[in-house]
Amino acid sequence: MERPHSLYFRYQGHGQLVAKPAAYVALTPGERLLNRIRATVFGRPLSTEEEIGERLSKKKALAIFSSDAISSSAYATEEILRVLVLAGASALLLSVEVAIAIALLLTVVSVSYRQVCRAYPGGGGAYVVARTNLAPIFGLIAAAALLIDYVMTVAVSTASAIAQIQSVVPAVYDIRIEIAFVSISLITIANLRGLRESGNIFAVPTYLFVGLALAIVAIGAIRIIGGTAAPMAAEPDAVSFGTEGLGVLLLLKAFAGGSVALTGVEAIANGVPAFKPPESRNAANTMTAMAVLLGILFIGLTVFAVQFGLRPTLAGGPSIVALAARTAFGDGSALFVTFAASTALILFLAANTSFNAFPRLAAILAEDGYMPRQFSFRGDRLAYSWGIVLLAGVAFLLLAAFGGDTHALIPLYSVGVFVTFTLSQVGMVRHWWNERSAGWRWRMAVNAGGAVLTAIVLLVVVSEKFVDGAYLVVILVPTLVAMMLFIKHQYTRSNRELAVAPDLVVRAPHREQRVVVPIPGLTRAVVQAINVGRTISDDIRAVYISDDPVSAADVRTTFERQVPGVTLVVVESPYRALSGPLLAYLELLDAAWPPDKREPITFVVIPEYVARSWWERILYNQASKRLRRVLLGRPHTVLVNVPYRREDPALFESALGAEHADQ
């Protein structure tokens, strides 16, 4: 025999059921249509049990979590050259040394984050490391810096992708904001569909870019070794050589500009739970693969640019990486066009790193009480929907505010990431000192050296980019920290107010109760609400507020004849207000209560007519909505909504009571 629960639930034990898909079936035509649209756009809903099947292999994870770091090779070299060109042609030769120095820093940081992946498999990266080993405030500083940097990643990557398209189609410059909106929207939808599907979408352009970029580096190496490398003719809109002196400050500024190559490195450590088991090892190996690829591409493209005399161009001109592809593959060749397309795609998709890391970090913060709890909610496709949507909106507004200009956005970039690098590595030093497991000395030495290096780089980046826009990040980080502390304070206070003492045994209520039913007249909805009120307390009264004494008298006559045993209170409202007189009447009831007795709980039972369609909702229940707004939060007051559905008249008939049925 089939159990009554079997259609909707799976029985797990006494008092414990698990909902089946049938329990989620929409009941109205509008809801069913909305569900079909959502399933088409985002895919069918996934159960929590299917989460393990959505985990990422190393190949897909490399495409998802490393696209930001790898794609930075498309503009990091250009940022170095754009600074050194101010000191003349000979200064450009030092760009290789600057790139090597940044690559060495990348090595130290990636080794450090390999250790973070293994030590903290739950994800969270620098936030969790700093919070656990230093202090919660340092964790919040790291989190705020990361959140800002993830937003910047989306904006900078999108702007740079559009710049790559401009290298082939200059007319695109005029519609760059529109293209940015469409691309961010598409990436948002892809991520709302879930990790595995976004991995399938993003893997092809990522690996295509890596393959063709390595081909450019290889072609350049062959020509350089063969002695056939020669400087190319300068572009008409190339930046002119300057006459500024080549000093330490200029080199530091070039280093600060090229350090954008390290952005996105920490994303893998934040997303360890997204990997297939064993999560920590797979994440650590993916980190190493990403660092090796980025180092080869970054140094290789920089050497190529120097050896072939490539110079950055003015706004709207071709990028350095596009000039490198033209030199290697030939202008207008199929490989050149393919590389330009793959570069634009990977830069668009580099934003995907943030779309995976930002929501996960926001979810961890929400679980710790530092962000609104909605950010820990996972949608139908097991994606952190709130974080994804928020990131998309803020990033587009930022990009639009800066006119889609990569070079205007760059000064705001990389400050946050070096804050997190430094705090993470200082936290890992403390971690190894406390744990002292096998190999802790050399691990602590690596993290200590990395902390010193990234702290120095942080000072360089802030000082060199402060006037150009980095001051905004310096202001935003403490602002976000203050906001998160405020949210934490609110949650802590509410938890304290709602907490039940562990030794309290909940029994039947001993506090007196009374019921007030605000009515618009005598209707079936009112009758149902009154009978619900009767089940709560014998002390019940209906309140009719009117600005017309004649109609009020008619209502009293009808009510007293048809609803015996319930007191009707008529409140005349000469100023035609509804909420104020009801609140005043409730205050009057409180004041009339004996002062030596504890005030009772007042149940305000509000009758509500359930409209059948969306447009009917505009016509009904506006007064009840106003009452709910003003009564919500009133001391010792409980609101009870009693919906009346006209398609089920049996509810009304049963509400009339057995006495009426007998008659």
Image (cartoon, rainbow, N blue to C red):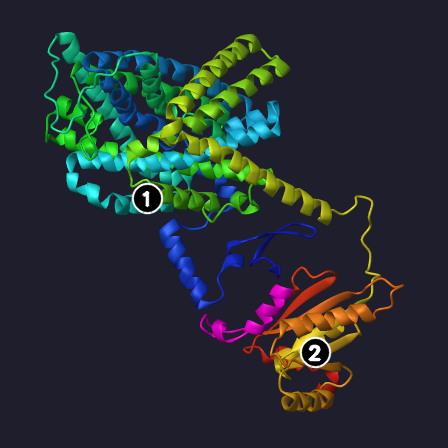
Residue 626 belongs to magenta span: yes
- The answer to whether 42 is drawn above or below residue 428 in the figure is below
Residue at 38% from the left image edge and 32% from the top image edge: 469
Between 200 and 546, the one nearer to me in the picture: 546
Between 648 and 338, the one nearer to me in the picture: 338
The residue indicated by pointer 2 is 543
Residue 311, quarter of the rendered image: top left
Residue 330 belongs to magenta span: no
Residue at 38% from the left image edge and 57% from the top image edge: 37
Q: Which residues are magenta?
A: 609-630
**Three-letter code, disc 1:** Ala
Residue 55 visible to an observer of this rendering: no
Residue 324, image x, y percentages: 18, 23
Residue 382 left/right relative to 403: right
Residue at 48% from the left image edge and 48% from the top image edge: 379
First in sequence, mark 2 or 1: give its number.
1
Residue 369, quarter of the rendered image: top right
Residue at 79% from the left image edge and 43% from the top image edge: 502
Between 175 and 369, the one nearer to me in the picture: 175
The residue indicated by pointer 1 is 400
Q: Which mark is residue 81?
A: none
The span from disc 2 to disc 1 (Cα, nearest Å) is 54 Å
| Contact check, label 2 and label 1, Cβ < 8 Å | no
**Three-letter code, disc 2:** Val
